[in-house]
Amino acid sequence: MKFTNETALSEFLLLGLTEDPALQPLIFSLFLSMYLVTLLGNLLIILAVSSEPHLHTPMYFFLCCLSFNDIAYTTCTIPQMLVNIQTDDQTITYTGCLTQVSFVIIFALVESFILVVMSYDRYVAICHPLRYGVIMNPRLCVLLVLVSLLISVADALLHTLLLQRLTFSSDRGIPDFFCELAHVIELSCSDTLIDNITVFVAACLFAGVPLGGIIFSYIHIVSSVLRMPSSGGKHKAFSTCGSHLSFVSLFYGISFGVYISSAVTDSPRNSAVASVMYTVVPQMLNPFIYSLRNKDMMEALRKLFGRIGSLL
């Protein structure tokens, strides 16, 4: 087998979900619909919050950040797949693949960090309501998002630099619809021990710590709510956490399901389907979870649609 080092002209092949030509139009239509729903839904969340002054609070600020991140997350994967299907060309350049790997890591980590920040916001609001305005001030909110972004960029940069030292064989088919870090590492004919250790440590650190923070926050939230004397106060407290807890359960539930399925089966196609579950589905459902379970968001969306309708 001939081994070649990576160059600017090197290419990878994104094999996608299936090689059956008859299914390509169906997959194209399905992913285009999912992308448009994700784009429109999250954009409406951002516009609704921005247009309502009473929603300019830390909770909705973080929700807007989450919606923006979901748009960016899906944009760095699905459009490339749609272009490949439409042009019947599975190739992606070496530079483009590494760029996609970096952005997927960044937005996946930012998603995880924002979820733990939102749980901390609910913890302060319920457990320390009198100090909420002082603790969750605008400067801290922006700082938390910026720190999350900087950590995510640093981790993505580390993985990208490690990838650049690898040599790849002539077999460059990636059994997925985007360049996933683990699949790219598997294609290397170099020693990938350092890369695999780094991936494992980063996964434990950047998945375990945020999840631990979320669990810690909700343990204190539940403990504080159960001590409330009135049932109305308990219901109101739990209702403010319902949407966030639903999305956290969806996000981490799918992630753990994908991890277990990948450990049980070695099927490339099953791995590709699993990738869809954690890179597309939660981001598409986010607007529905936060709008249908939130009266303030429903009212803000109703007013937004009213303003849009009056302009038409």
Image (spheres, rainbow, N blue to C red):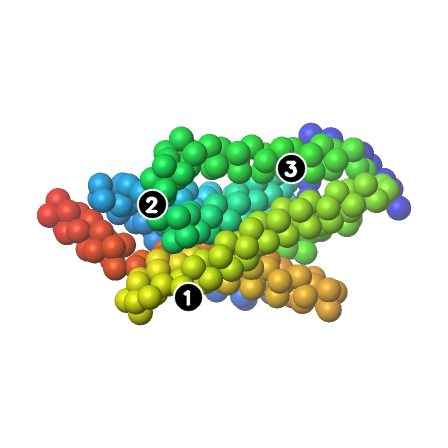
Instruction: Answer with mark 1 or mark 2, whichever residue precedes in sequence.
Output: 2
- For residue 98, the mark is none
The residue that appears at 37% across and 34% down in the rendered structure is 138
Q: Is residue 174 above or below residue 258?
A: above
Dot 2 and dot 3 residues touching (CB under 8 Å): no
When asked about the image quadrant of residue 302, the answer is bottom left
Residue behind mark 2: 130
- Amino acid under disc 1: Leu
Instruction: Answer with mark 2 or mark 3, whichever residue precedes in sequence.
Output: 2
Residue behind mark 3: 155
Asked if residue 134 can be seen in this view, the reply is yes
- Amino acid under disc 3: Asp
Instruction: Answer with mark 3 or mark 1, whichever residue precedes in sequence.
Output: 3
Residue behind mark 1: 226
Name the element at disc 2. Answer: helix
Name the element at disc 1. Answer: helix
Image x and y of residue 147, in percent: 53, 34
Image x and y of residue 256, in percent: 62, 62
Image x and y of residue 60, in percent: 34, 46
Q: Tell me the distance, in whole angstroms, between the alpha carbons under discs 1 and 2.
A: 18 Å
How packed mark 3 is, by other alpha carbons closer than 10 Å (few <14, some 14-19, many 20 or more), is some
Q: Tell me the distance, in whole angstroms, between the alpha carbons under discs 2 and 3.
A: 37 Å
Judged left or right of residue 252, residue 301 is: left
Taking depth in this image into account, of 261 and 256 the one nearest to the observer is 256
Taking depth in this image into account, of 183 and 162 the one nearest to the observer is 162
How packed mark 2 is, by other alpha carbons closer than 10 Å (few <14, some 14-19, many 20 or more), is few
The residue that appears at 73% across and 46% down in the rendered structure is 201
